[in-house]
């Protein structure tokens, strides 16, 4: 068996969460960095692995997968002895799946807009920022009650969901994690994790 290959552009793209999870699972992996400007995400070989030419993609000895949340779900289940995912018959499994999907389908959809403000007119920027702030206020209604009463998204403790959420939340931290909030304390806790630091998830 060869180490899992992770295709990405850099340490700090959406491959960050995959690398962090693999470290927490103590599973060996190999980084393959693609240079977009050299067309390396557009080669026929890479398009066979990811038809959209995006990252991250993993190749686990022939099991090829894209979508960072799906990759993390797959890995946490595959290495379930490490207990970063509730078992299928655990009642917490439902909440776990909810937050895993939420992290990209709901949270990241809004947070990612923060990265596309440059180059917009002031009026467009204000419009976008108002939308982002409004959506963050709504998302806080789901996130903050959980993180103000417990240290992790699941009451059982640290799991793959915390990795997904912690990799996304900082993109709109000013709106989602005000000083003194449970979400701010959660991010502090995640930033202190040695393996997150090792793979530079937080820069
Ligand atoms: N929902 C996907 C998003 C994948 C995605 O858009 N990745 C970005 C990098 S973080 C990408 O490949 N961008 C290159 C491009 O759009 O050309 C995931 O979570 O994996």
Image (tube, helix red, strand yellow):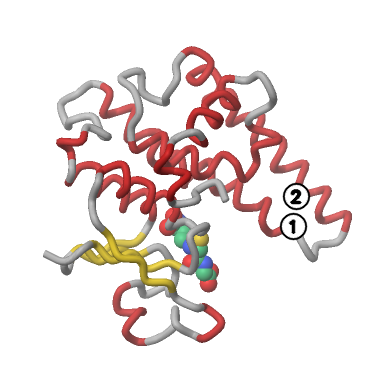
Q: Residue at x 69, y 42 (%)?
A: 132
* Residue bearing mark 2: 128
| Residue at 42% in and 24% down | 152
Q: Secondary structure at mark 2?
A: helix
Residue of label 1: 117
Where residue 4 sits: x, y (%)?
24, 62
Identify the residue at horizontal 72%, vertical 43% (top origin): 131
Instruction: Characterize the local packing of mark 1: few (<14), some (14-19) or many (20 or more) Cα atoms within 10 angstroms.
Output: some
For the residues labelled 1 and 2, the Cα–Cα distance comes to 8 Å
As helix, strand or loop, the secondary structure at mark 1 comes to: loop
Q: Is residue 127 left or right of residue 115?
A: right
**Which percent across, then down, holds residue 90?**
19, 23
**Left or right: 69 with respect to 123?**
left
Residue 181, given in percent of the width and then of the height, sits at 62, 20
Q: Disc 1 or 2, which lies upstream in sequence?
A: 1
Image position of 72 with respect to 60: above or below: above
Taking the view exactly as shown, the residue that stands out farthest to the left is: 1
């Amino acid at each position: 068996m060869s180490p899992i290959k992770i295709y990405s552009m850099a340490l700090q793209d959406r491959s960050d969460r995959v690398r962090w999870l693999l470290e927490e699972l103590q599973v060996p992996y190999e980084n393959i960095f693609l240079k977009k400007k050299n067309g390396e995400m557009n080669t026929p070989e890479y398009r066979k692995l990811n038809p959209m030419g995006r990252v991250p993609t993993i190749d686990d000895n022939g099991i090829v997968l894209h979508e960072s949340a799906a990759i993390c779900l797959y890995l946490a289940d595959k290495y379930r002895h490490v207990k970063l995912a509730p078992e299928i018959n655990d009642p917490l499994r439902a909440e776990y799946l909810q937050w895993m999907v939420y992290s990209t389908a709901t949270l990241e959809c809004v947070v990612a807009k923060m990265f596309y403000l440059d180059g917009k007119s002031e009026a467009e920027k204000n419009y976008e920022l108002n939308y982002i702030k409004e959506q963050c206020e709504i998302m806080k209604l789901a996130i903050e009650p959980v993180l103000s009463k417990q240290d992790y998204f699941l009451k059982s403790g640290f799991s793959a969901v915390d990795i997904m959420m912690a990799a996304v939340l900082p993109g709109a931290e000013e709106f989602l994690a005000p000083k003194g909030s449970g979400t701010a304390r959660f991010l502090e806790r995640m930033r202190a994790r040695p393996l997150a630091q090792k793979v530079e998830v937080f820069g």
